[in-house]
Amino acid sequence: MELVIRKIAQQDNEQIARLIRSILSDMGVPKVGTAYEDKALDNMFDEYAKARSSYFVAIKNDEVLGCAGIAPLKNAKETICELQKMYVAQKARGQGVAQRLMDACVRAAEGFGFESCYLETMPDMKAAHRLYEKFGFQFIENRLGDTGHHSCPVFMIKYL
């Protein structure tokens, strides 16, 4: 079966939470101050049903192989969104899944009228950094808004 990128459905919640926590654990990312402890992680469908928010999943054979979303950046200008919780399963990496998810997120952000997209990530996620740069994200020195992820010290922005 072909890989499909679509908006999140209620039944995806459990697989998404398990995938994200598994990837973060495998990478040795702190559980505190990262997406690992986000309250919304177990109910992503409702979290991204909010205004100017979208969450996408990469599905193959009913399995979530990747996910990513955008939402307004809290405590920032209303023209700035945040790329949130972008993860791809190890077995699906290098197959264009992340690029397709990023395309969906950027199109959604533009459609919602955002002027820029911000993200926070970890220093060791070098493959992710390369993907973000390929899509026009630039490293910046200072944190924007309030993501709640104080353990993520790498900041990037893309102007849409």
Image (cartoon, grey):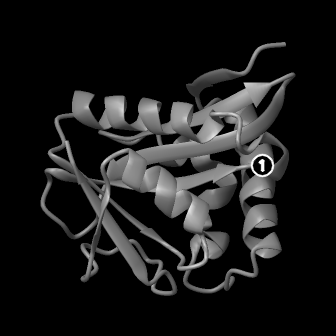
User: In the drawing, does residue 71 fall left or right of residue 19?
Assistant: left
Q: Quadrant of residue 114?
A: top left
Density class for disc 1 (Cα within 10 Å; few <14, some 14-19, many ≥20) is some
Q: Nearer the viewer, residue 94 or 144?
A: 94
The residue tagged 1 is 89
Q: Is residue 73 above or below residue 45?
A: below
Q: Is residue 148 above or below residue 10?
A: below
Q: Nearer the viewer, residue 34 or 135?
A: 135
At label 1, which amino acid type do we have? Ala
Q: Residue furthest top?
A: 1
What residue is drawn where x is 44% and y is 84%?
153
The percent position of residue 72, horizontal first and vertical second, equals 29, 53
Instruction: Label 1, secondary structure: give it.
Output: loop
The percent position of residue 16, horizontal first and vertical second, equals 72, 48
Q: Is residue 3 above or below residue 81?
A: above
Name the quarter where the C terminus is drawn.
Answer: top left
The percent position of residue 158, horizontal first and vertical second, equals 26, 53
